[in-house]
Image (cartoon, rainbow, N blue to C red):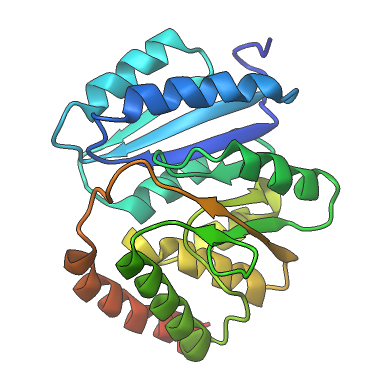
Amino acid sequence: MMTENARPRVSIVIPVYNEELILFGAVEQLLEKMKAFDFSYELILTENGSKDKTRSIASNLAERHDCLRVLNSDEPNYGKALKRGILEARGEYVVCDEIDLCDTDFYRRALEILFSGRAEMVVGSKALAESNDNRPVMRRVATGVLNGMLRVATGFTGTDTHGLKAFRREALLSVVNDCQLERDLFTSEFVIRAERAGFAVQEIPLELREIRAPSVNLYRRVPKVMKDMARLVYLIRIKG
């Protein structure tokens, strides 16, 4: 068992916002699945501005499980919450997950690549031919449009930037600190900057089956995403 001051090999970072309906069950199920792995780990729930009982449920879970830490913020901001989780992670490797996915098969495949040194970042791509994306059609379309725009606007050569990813923390920490965007496009900026900096980024397919509808309405996100897209182009293409 990992002692309080020992550094875990892996940090799992999951932003949570208004997840009272699934949080307890999803975390308990994830921790049960983690028993199949032989590395030490910590689970970081980075709660951001929830209006429901998410914060109290997360606190209760942290009291039940020594491996779990909760970071709280009053601002609903996915990217900022994820970045904070990465910066405060103690693991040699970081896995970024979603509470409605908790895809330990991705952990297994991605960490095998990272542990072997074949890449410094692994991205779970929803757009690879081998992937099975079972989300609603409009979400799949939105992902395709966003990734197409990113390739045209920034020169990104991959197929996906948003969603599950794992990386060697020490190698990518400077890239995380360079990222200026928050909210939805933080992860896109992170992956694009890592690629442009010459880090070995490998994509692997996903079996994507969410257990609830998005906590933030897709159409309400569009204006902010487009504004951040313009800023991302400036940061990547002009400012560098």
Q: Nearer the viewer, residue 164 or 180?
A: 164
Q: Position of residue 37 (x, y in %)?
A: 71, 25
Q: Residue shown at 55%/40% (left/top)?
A: 103
Q: Foreground: 205 or 16?
A: 205
Q: Quadrant of residue 56?
A: top left
On screen, residue 223 versus residue 111, left or right, reads: left
Q: Nearer the viewer, residue 97 or 45?
A: 97
- Image quarter hosting the N terminus: top right
Eyeballing the image, is 135 above or below 18? below
**Taking the image as drawn, is residue 96 in sight?**
yes
Residue 178 higher or lower than 33, as above or below:
below
- Residue that protrudes farthest toward the left in the picture: 51
Q: Position of residue 194 (x, y in %)?
A: 63, 67
- Residue 18: x and y in percent read 22, 38
Query: Which residue appears at 62% of the width and 49% of the height?
Result: 166
The one nearer the camera, 143 or 41, is: 143
The image shows residue 3 at horizontal and vertical percentages of 65, 11
Residue in view at x 34 percent, y 67 percent: 137
